[in-house]
Amino acid sequence: MSGTPPLPAVTRLDEHFWRGGARGRLMILRCDVCATWLHPPTPRCRRCGSTAVRPQPVSGRGRVLTYTVNHQRWFPAMPPPYVIAIVELVEQPHLQLLTRLVDCDPGEVRIGMEVGVRFEPHGDVHLPVFAPI
Ligand code: ZN
């Protein structure tokens, strides 16, 4: 990919997620009290209500829960076709993130396919994307 795709507005609550890739780590908030992983980031645990949440590294492995193939050229830096997917991480059921699949033919993507994280650096933002493993 050349150029810059749309980048997130990084906040204190989610900077671990967008910048963890600088160290090759996918960082997800986890509750210190009940050990629940929390994504999208939230200042309060969705399960027990604790505010003792902090970023922890995950394995970066998951499965494709669902996906769609985009054929529209919305952004010059993102030539179609490309695959937008919801990936469920192996650490916990329903721990999902919206991402893009790379290094695979859109026609070969399957529900349940095992994928691993990679990072696309754009300045101080490292976009987590996933590829088949
Ligand atoms: Zn909790």
Image (tube, rainbow, N blue to C red):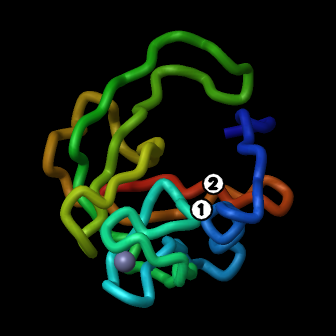
Task: Say what secondary structure mark 2 lies in.
Answer: strand
Label 1 neighbour load within 10 Å: few <14, some 14-19, many 20+:
many
Residue 120 seen = yes
The residue under the point 72% across, 34% down is 6
Of 73 and 14, nearer the camera is 14
- Across and down, in percent, residue 111 comes to 15, 41
Task: Say what secondary structure mark 1 lies in.
Answer: strand
Label 2 neighbour load within 10 Å: few <14, some 14-19, many 20+:
many
Of 9 and 69, nearer the camera is 9
Residue type, mark 1 in image: Phe
- Across and down, in percent, residue 19 comes to 71, 68
Quadrant of the rendered image holding ligand 1: bottom left
Measured in 3D between alpha carbons, the distance from the residue under mark 2 to the one under mark 1, in whole angstroms, is: 5 Å
* Residue 123 position by quadrant: bottom right
Image position of 112 (left or right of 60): left
- Across and down, in percent, residue 22 comes to 71, 74
Tell which residue pokes out farthest to the front in this image: 49
Q: Residue 119 carries which label?
A: 1
Q: Residue 127 carries which label?
A: 2
Q: Residue 91 carries which label?
A: none
Q: Is residue 1 above or below residue 34?
A: above
Tell which residue pokes out farthest to the top in this image: 72
